[in-house]
Image (cartoon, helix red, strand yellow):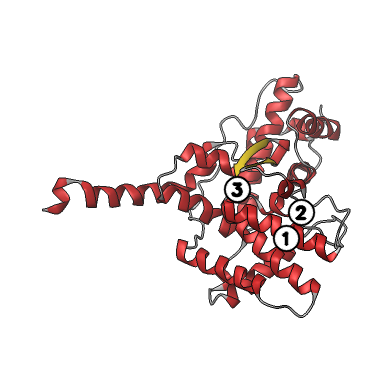
Amino acid sequence: MATGFDLENFLEMLAAERGAADNTLAGYRRDLEDFAGFLGRKTLAAAQPEDISAYMGDLTRRGFAKSSQARRLSALKQFYKFLYAEGSREDDPTRTLSAPKKSGSLPKVLSIEEVDTLIETARAESEKPQKSAAARLRAQRMYTLIEVLYATGLRVSELVALPVTAALRDARLIEIKGKGGKERLVPLSRAAQAAMKDYVGLRAAEGAYEKSPWLFPSRGDSGHLTRQHFARDLKDLAISAGLDASKVSPHVLRHAFASHLLQNGADLRVVQQLLGHADISTTQIYTHVLDERLRELVETAHPLAKR
């Protein structure tokens, strides 16, 4: 019978073979320990299909969203697939179980005009006279953040942890280390390149963060700007731009990047690569954009549409 030893082996495999990040490992541990608590005296390795079905029902009664239930079942499937491959079990108790269907809600998306307004507001703020050197740096940092985010579609965790060397190279592409340590190249617009260079130049002129390895340094424990801090500043910028702050977040700008690319003819596989999605199914939440573009194409270009 397997015990917590199997869980530790499973987590070790995720870290060593798949390069899983600490947050990912903590999530797997949390999900599997929750199931172990549900099982009571029965060990994880002794669980049967009916135990897992009962657990999924318990998650529903506890008010877990379908997406959260799907994530828990995915963790269980990977764990039992690992036990089966290692010979700790002769079967996979999750084999016949499927995840609950998600509601299919679409991500919030800003229009191109709204993003333009947001960027222009940040740019204008960066060019205004400020009361102090710190205020000048904050304004230029915000403008740089939003230019780079919309130009690249980076995850906010990738954005705030960019190295300062990304701004020092005169390159149209920057290398990003994403989830699981996977690397990808993303293009930079000329505006984003210029904003990065101006920000680093202003930092140097003010003598700030001279030894920091981060593009967006801070005094906090991580050494760089936090996701939460950027999200708060972005809400403030949205209000200054006259936009609904509830519609604006770093993740919404990432969605805007993908949606606007597809609206203008980009291939879904290219967008998948730029976003760093391991599976095309994740990128397919944007197929509504493609459907709309195809509808407009038929309505405007097909001879029958003119009758």
Q: Position of residue 240 (x, y in %)?
A: 60, 77
Identify the residue shown where x is 60% and y is 53%: 60
Mark 2 — residue? Answer: 215
Residue sitting nearer the eye, 54 or 29:
29
The three-letter code of the residue at mark 1 reads Tyr
- Image position of 295 (left or right of 127): left
First of labels 1, 3 by sequence position: 3
Tag 3 and tag 2, C-beta contact below 8 Å: no
Q: Position of residue 67 (x, y in %)?
A: 58, 50
Q: Quadrant of residue 121?
A: bottom right
The three-letter code of the residue at mark 2 reads Leu
Secondary structure of residue under mark 1: helix
Q: Residue furthest bottom?
A: 131
Tag 1 and tag 2, C-beta contact below 8 Å: yes
Mark 3 — residue? Answer: 188
Q: Is residue 226 visible?
A: no
Secondary structure of residue under mark 2: loop
Q: Is residue 101 visible?
A: yes
The three-letter code of the residue at mark 3 reads Leu
Q: Quadrant of residue 209?
A: bottom right
Residue sitting nearer the eye, 208 or 236:
208
On screen, 286 above or below 253?
Answer: above
Number of residues whose C-alpha sits closer than 10 Å to that of mark 1, classed few (under 14), some (14–19) or many (20 or more): many
For residue 199, the mark is: 1
- Tell which tag, 1 or 2, sits nearer the viewer: 1
Number of residues whose C-alpha sits closer than 10 Å to that of mark 2, classed few (under 14), some (14–19) or many (20 or more): many
Query: Distance from label 1 to label 3 (Cα)?
Result: 15 Å
On screen, 96 above or below 217?
Answer: above
First of labels 1, 2 by sequence position: 1
